[in-house]
Amino acid sequence: MPRHLGVIMDGNGRWAQARGKPRTEGHKAGVEALGRLIELSARQGIEFVTVYSFSSENWRRPKEEVSFLFNLLRRYVAAELERFVKNGIRVKVLGEREGLDKTICGLLDQVESRTASGTRMQLNLAFNYGAKFELASAMRKIARQVASGELAPDAITADMVGENLYTRDIPDPDLILRTGGEKRLSNFLLWQAAYSEFIFIDQCWPDFDEDTFRDVLLEFGQRQRRYGALENR
Ligand code: IPE
Ligand code: IPE
Ligand code: MG
């Protein structure tokens, strides 16, 4: 069982288009699939689930789609807040807050603080997230310590980089699942995925269900993780 599962929830638009519907219908159906993922993961005892819901590059989409996605997030968080509290789901938002509108930031702060004492599972919403930006910010922070004379360049370690990422308190993902058929990371958790297992499936995100979840966990269970060492005998 992965301790931390990352999911690139891709294929909403194509799912909708294949059904003659507007892309926005795919995003709505994607929210339902997210509900299934959270429920199934909590039931399996997975400790951390990180979902990629809006990338720093998704701003390149038509502004109608961007604002639809923002409204969807707003409504989703507001509608689910009490359920998260009740079910012990601690929510964290990974991503850049600057440039987001104040009401969204307020809502994100609220969901983080209201759910902070949840102990059953942590749900990380990667929203307005981009790994390259995350790494560049970490480098800026470390560079400032060097510039002030607090830190010698030779003393910089990989752990220090990790401590300056949004994921500082979160173990690296054991498994990253991407739906929708593309085989790439699209700027998701580049640093943290150094030893993640990857599973890419063709199914579009809105079709994600219990059968998919079971198959994915079975495949993960068959992977042999060596971290550069030799297999355990
Ligand atoms: C993923 O589905 C959701 C977001 C990126 C917000 P897409 O919207 O990328 O759907 P496709 O890949 O175009 O089908
Ligand atoms: C990745 O999907 C981002 C999210 C799922 C939020 P994209 O649809 O944006 O990725 P590309 O453009 O196909 O690489
Ligand atoms: Mg896509």
Image: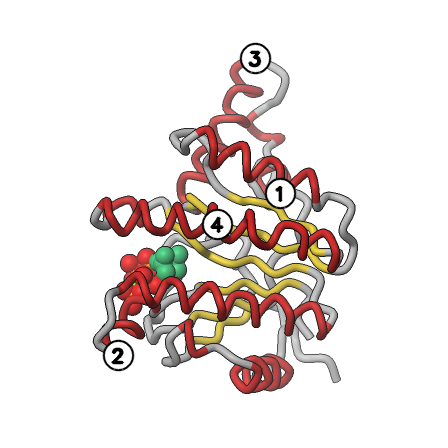
State yes or no: discs 1 and 2 in contact (Cβ < 8 Å): no
Rendered image: mark on residue 111: 1
Q: Which residue in the protein does label 4 denote? A: 75
Give the CA separation, mark 3 to mark 4: 44 Å
Q: Position of residue 80 (x, y in %)?
A: 60, 54
Q: Name the N-terminal-most of marks 3 and 4.
A: 4
On screen, residue 210 versus residue 70, left or right, reads: right
User: Which residue lies at the image location 59% right of the left edge and 33% below the top edge?
Assistant: 156
Could you say which is closer to the camera, residue 71 or residue 142?
71
* Numbered label tally: 4
Image spot of residue 209 (x, y percent): 52, 80
Kind of residue sitting beneath label 2:
Arg
Residue annotated with mark 2: 19
Mark 1 nearby-residue class (10 Å; few <14, some 14–19, many ≥20) = many
Q: CA distance from mark 4 to mark 2?
A: 24 Å
Which comes before the other along the chain, label 1 or label 2?
2
Q: Nearer the viewer, residue 53 or 103?
A: 103
